[in-house]
Amino acid sequence: MHVSPSSVSQRLKSLERDFGAKLYRKNKDGIELTTAGQTLLSTANQVLHQLDTLRRTLNPSLEKPVQALAVGGSYNPSAKHLPAAIAAFKKSHPEIGVTFLTSYRSIVEKWVREGEVEIAIVQNPSQSCMADLYTEAFAVDSLVFFTHIGHPLSKKQKIGFADLADTPLIVRESWDPTEKILALVKSRGLTLNVALRCASPDAVKAAVRRKMGIGILFHDLIEDDIRRKEFKVLRVHGLPRLKGNSYIIVNKNTVLKPPATEFLALLRDMRRSQRKPVTLRTQTGTNDS
């Protein structure tokens, strides 16, 4: 914003004096708006929008700038969180055009670095991303084994590693979470039967639908299929829980435009409303989702 932190702090304190209310509080991540602060921000945005509309009504020669927002996401957040966020954003900002791009985590990080997207959500950012880009914890998900509801293993309440070894496995190609699972099982004296390696989560789901074997994906990617009673998550005895943490990422060296700033605020509201807690990134997470 090209404004010093001390100047911003003084202006915030001045606003609090003017309105006679506490507008923000400090937390472990920096600061967050209070209820009064959120009300002020929302109302201020409306007032500024009304002033802009009035200005253009009184002076039709003023051209209305075309506003746009470019959002990116790796596969997991793109299947669950981002569509809901974009739908909510479009409902309150129908005049803003939104571009939504999805790919592997490494590619999405590259898009943010190069300015192709202003804001993105990726699962378990790379070390270089954590160092070079602004990152903010958003959500956590679990890696699961799943199968079609018509598969024989879906009838079992709990299965063991031996059941997995005897069943064709459908995984994503060159995907770190899969390699962690395979290495873990191998360390216990078993080798899984990887029958098919797919390029995308959708391809894994398509193969499982055809009852070609058991799939491995993050839970969010199959949540709707489970709700429709098409897939069932398998409880594997002795398998530790593997997690993936989703993060909001933004280019540190770029000033966000108003649409991106408002979309970031919307994502933060979504994060606060989530039932399951957001955890800080750990080394047990998985990559490139």
Image (cartoon, rainbow, N blue to C red):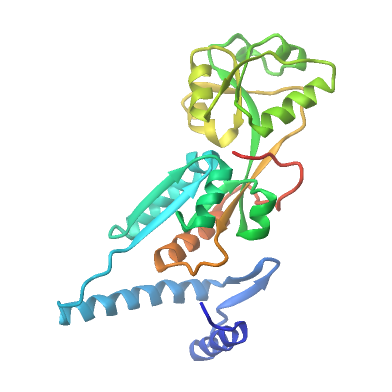
Q: Is residue 182 above or below residue 67?
A: above
Q: Residue at x 61, y 59 (%)?
A: 133
Q: Is residue 59 above or below residue 276?
A: below
Relative image position of residue 123 (x, y in whole percent): 61, 45
- Asked whether residue 79 is in view, the answer is yes
* Residue 98 located left or right of residue 173: left
Between 231 and 199, the one nearer to me in the picture: 199
What x and y, as percent, mark residue 27? 68, 69
Image quadrant where residue 70 sits: bottom left
Front residue of 226 and 209: 209
- Residue at 65% x, 51% y: name it: 278
Residue at 65 percent of width and 29 percent of height: 144
Measuring 57% from the left and 65% from the top, which residue is drawn there? 252
The picture places residue 16, in percent across and down from the top left corner, at 54, 86
**Is 192 rendered above or below residue 117?**
above
| Quadrant of the image containing the C terminus | top right
Tell me the quarter of the picture where residue 170 sits.
Answer: top right
**Residue farthest right in this picture:** 188
Instruction: Describe residue 266's horizontal placement relative to residue 271 as left or right.
Output: left
Question: Taking the image as drawn, is residue 238 in sight?
Answer: no
Left or right of residue 166: residue 272? left
